[in-house]
Amino acid sequence: MTQNFVRILFSIALGMMLSFGALAEQPEEQAQAEVVKVESVAMDAAAKVEPAVEEVDSGYQIGPEDVLEISVWKEEGLKKEALVRPDGGLSFPLIGEVQAAGKTVGQLKKEIAQRLEKFIPDPVVSIAFLKVGGNKIFVIGKVNNPGEFPAGRYVDVLQALSMAKGLTPFASENGIKIMRKEGGKDIVFPFRYSDVKNGEDLGQNIQLKGGDVVVVP
């Protein structure tokens, strides 16, 4: 009887150990299953994510001698370092010649994508500046350092005057003019420095374009 009792106790103990083991293993198996599931979902999501594309358009107009890197997502053969020629054009595979000068990055991306749709479904075009080239602005007259300066991707009138080291004591603060050639015509924008300096009429502090001349009498 003693032996039977011992066997019964041993059986009970063994059963409890097996039960505890099963309970301990179950969460681990579930956890592993969850990990596999999460990894699978993450991989699927990663496969669907498109590359980050420059959405914000600074308003800077592309000009001659700018160097652009143009690429199309998932199309290795459609990546090119393109120099904007003096005539404002550049060439790109499949679509040939494109007029780039005078367009913003957003406008150029849209045009290239539209023309590529004949060859590729839903093309995603990216454009990056490698070099801002020939766009120059000129500041002349009563400033401390008159001359030509790079237009960069965004330069307004105040920044241009700062590049020229500011006005001389004899400058006419409210007689400043910005001269621009556009469409074969001369356009003049008045600029009242004292107003802008005092936080008034800030709309006249316009973004300059390549070729603009700031005249300080």
Image (cartoon, rainbow, N blue to C red):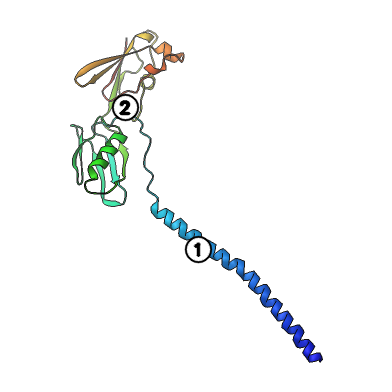
* Quadrant showing the C terminus: top left
Image quarter of residue 197: top left
Does any portion of residue 171 appear in the rendered image?
A: no
In percent of width and height, residue 130 lies at 31, 39
Image quarter of residue 141: top left
Q: Nearer the viewer, mark 1 or mark 2?
A: 1
User: 180 or 142, which is in the foreground?
Assistant: 180
User: 182 or 137, which is in the foreground?
Assistant: 182
Q: Farthest right residue?
A: 2
Which residue is disc 1 drawn over? 36
* Quadrant showing the N terminus: bottom right
1 or 2: tag closer to the N-terminus: 1
Q: Residue at x 27, y 42 (%)?
A: 113
Q: Residue at x 43, y 54 (%)?
A: 45
In percent of width and height, residue 76 lies at 28, 52
Label 2 sits on what residue type? Ala
Name above or below for residue 104 compared with residue 140.
Answer: below
In percent of width and height, residue 100 lies at 24, 34
Does any portion of residue 15 appear in the rendered image?
A: yes
**Mark 2: which secondary structure?**
loop
Which residue is disc 2 drawn over? 151
Q: Which residue is drawn at 20% across and 22% down?
A: 183
**Mark 1: which secondary structure?**
helix
Name above or below for residue 209 compared with residue 191.
Answer: below
Label 1 sits on what residue type? Val
Q: Residue at x 64, y 70 (%)?
A: 24
Image quarter of residue 129: top left
